[in-house]
């Protein structure tokens, strides 16, 4: 039985809290804790979006967590991870401007100028 054991509303509430904590850590400059909060939020939420079948609220929250995580990875000088996280966002929402920009910025940092331009 793959179904989440918790009520979906409880999961959403927990994930929103994790996202807000991540945002606070980010603002305070604690990138490691911000990254941890965004990652935990993503893994707690993923069961509600199996095969990209989650509702709009679930998808929006996942996109938000992962675009934030992509930024944290970039600021931690992890452009490959930043690119990969942004690519995961684009699997959920292929036209997400923030994810395209994050991925392009990461690719540029890695020297992939042509691919970076393709995302913009």
Image: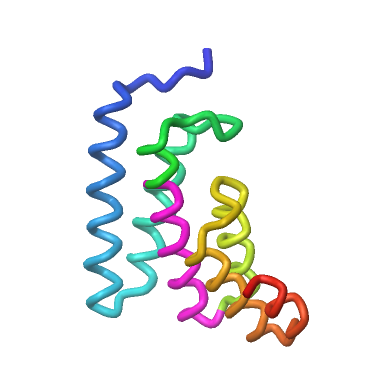
Residue 61 in picture, x, y percent from top left: 37, 47
Q: Residue furthest top?
A: 1
Depth check: give the residue in front, 38 or 83: 83
- In the rendered image, which quarter is residue 9 located in? top left
Answer with left or right where residue 59 lies relative to residue 37. Answer: right
Depth check: give the residue in front, 23 or 56: 56
What range of the chain is rendered magenta?
61-77
Depth check: give the residue in front, 54 or 11: 54
Quadrant of image for the C terminus? bottom right
Residue at image x 42%, y 22%? 4
Q: Is residue 74 magenta?
A: yes
Residue 99 in picture, x, y percent from top left: 53, 64
Q: From the viewer's perspective, is residue 75 above or below residue 69? A: below
- In the rendered image, which quarter is residue 38 located in? bottom left
Residue at image x 57%, y 60%? 85
Residue 18 in picture, x, y percent from top left: 28, 51
């Amino acid at each position: 039985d793959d179904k989440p054991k918790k009520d979906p509303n409880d999961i959403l509430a927990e994930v929103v809290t994790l996202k807000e904590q991540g945002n606070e850590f980010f603002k305070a400059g604690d990138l490691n804790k911000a990254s941890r909060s965004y990652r935990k939020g993503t893994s707690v939420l993923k069961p509600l979006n199996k095969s990209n079948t989650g509702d709009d609220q679930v998808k929006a929250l996942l996109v938000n967590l992962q675009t934030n995580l992509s930024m944290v990875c970039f600021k931690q000088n992890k452009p490959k991870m930043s690119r990969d996280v942004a690519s995961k966002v684009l699997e959920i929402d292929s036209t997400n401007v923030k994810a395209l920009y994050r991925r392009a910025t990461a690719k540029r940092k890695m020297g992939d100028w042509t691919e970076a331009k393709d995302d913009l």
